[in-house]
């Protein structure tokens, strides 16, 4: 099964998860990047990110060179911002309007996924969601722990897809 992992990562957690998935599945990985590349930290990040979510902002994105029709399975990954998928992921899904695909979803967070996965699924009508999972602070917990959790999740996806 040809697989693409499409993810947005601000602090590297979703990128780490996507890399572990790539190692396990030999997937093609595509990172969503915003035109605004300014890096914010601390309170500035909290205020800016919250403003993005609550203001329902859809940031401008750099082109993503992925032909989604070429993939049997698309795995979407996002950090959680204010209990929601990151605005960059929302912007990507609004522009691409993926339909008729088999999808799997993951999110990364520091202590609460909120309704991020439910909100992500709501943006994906007309698709088959094979599974979803979340990862708490994957970069802090280490790659080995993440590899174990992802391996177990991928087995459930395989069983669901059979």
Image (spheres, helix red, strand yellow):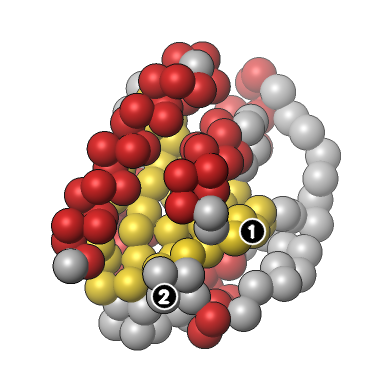
Question: Which residue is located at x 30 percent, y 77 percent?
Answer: 127
Asked whether, in this view, residue 155 is left or right of residue 62, the answer is left
Judge whether 62 appears above or below 42 on screen: below
Question: Which residue is located at x 25 percent, y 57 percent?
Answer: 158
**Residue 88 occupies quadrant:** bottom right
Q: Quadrant of the N terminus?
A: bottom left
Q: Residues within 10 Å of mark 1 (few under 14, many from 20)?
A: some
| Residue 50 seen from this side | no
Q: Which mark is residue 45?
A: none
Question: Which residue is located at x 47 percent, y 65 percent?
Answer: 3
Residue 46, position in %: x, y? 59, 28
Q: Which mark is residue 72?
A: 2
Marks 2 & 1, CB-CB < 8 Å contact:
no
Question: Which residue is located at x 72 percent, y 72 percent?
Answer: 65
**Residue 161 occupies quadrant:** bottom left
Residue 37, position in %: x, y? 81, 45
Mark 2 and mark 1: Cα distance apart in space:
15 Å
Q: Quadrant of the C terminus?
A: bottom left
Residue 17, position in %: x, y? 50, 38
Q: Residues within 10 Å of mark 2 (few under 14, many from 20)?
A: few
Judge whether 140 appears above or below 61 on screen: above
| Residue 26 seen from this side | yes
Residue 130, position in %: x, y? 24, 62
Asked whether, in this view, residue 14 is left or right of residue 39, the answer is left
Q: Residue beneath label 1, please?
A: 30
Give the number of the mark in front: 2 or 1: 2
**Chain-order first, disc 2 or disc 1:** 1
| Mark 1 element type | strand
């Amino acid at each position: 099964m040809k697989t693409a992992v499409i993810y947005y990562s601000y602090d590297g957690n979703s990128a780490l998860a996507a890399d572990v998935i790539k190692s396990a599945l030999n997937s093609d990985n595509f990172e969503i990047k915003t035109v605004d590349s300014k890096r914010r930290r601390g309170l500035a990040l909290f205020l800016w990110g919250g403003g993005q979510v609550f203001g329902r902002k859809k940031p401008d994105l750099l082109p993503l060179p992925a032909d989604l029709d070429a993939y049997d399975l698309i795995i979407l990954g996002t950090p959680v911002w204010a209990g929601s998928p990151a605005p960059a992921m929302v912007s990507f899904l609004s522009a691409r309007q993926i339909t008729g695909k088999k999808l799997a979803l993951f999110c990364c967070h520091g202590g609460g996924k909120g309704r991020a996965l439910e909100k992500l699924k709501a943006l994906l009508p007309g698709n088959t969601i094979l599974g979803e999972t979340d990862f708490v602070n994957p970069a802090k917990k280490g790659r080995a722990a993440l590899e174990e959790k992802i391996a177990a999740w991928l087995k459930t996806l395989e069983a669901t897809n059979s």
